[in-house]
Amino acid sequence: MTPLESATNRIEELETKMMFQEDLIEQLNQSIISQQQDIRKLTQIIERMNTQLEDLRQPNVIDASLETPPPHY
């Protein structure tokens, strides 16, 4: 094998490896995008649940001393 053939083979090998790496990077990028979308959705769900929990914690009945007596008293 001549030095030129050897260099050509090495370049082809590097190009092949680079194509696989580019594909892998794209797959990883898509995975990160998908995960970020899932995280945003889950964060919104948690925020809604926290709001609902706070609403449940607030008493729905006012203190009896603050209520006006019924008209028949």
Image: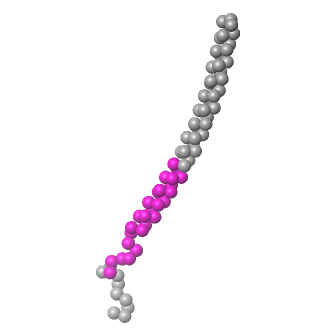
Protein image colouring = one colour
Where residue 18 appears, as percent x and y from the top left, is: 62, 24
**Which residue in the rendered view is the most extreme toward the left?**
65
Q: Which percent across, then down, holds residue 24? A: 60, 32
Residue at 55 percent across and 40 percent down: it is 32
- Left or right, 71 with respect to 28, comes to left
Q: Nearer the viewer, residue 12 or 61?
A: 12
Residue at image coords 35%, 81% = 67
Name the main secondary structure of what is drawn in magenta.
helix
| In magenta stretch: residue 48 | yes
Q: Nearer the viewer, residue 9 or 27?
A: 9
Would you say 5 lies left or right of 32 here? right
- 72 vs 48, left or right, is left
Q: Residue at x 58, y 41 (%)?
A: 31
Residue 4 occupies quadrant = top right
Q: Which residues are magenta?
A: 39-64
Decide: is 26 above or below 70: above
Find residue 15 and report its horizontal and vertical position in percent.
65, 21
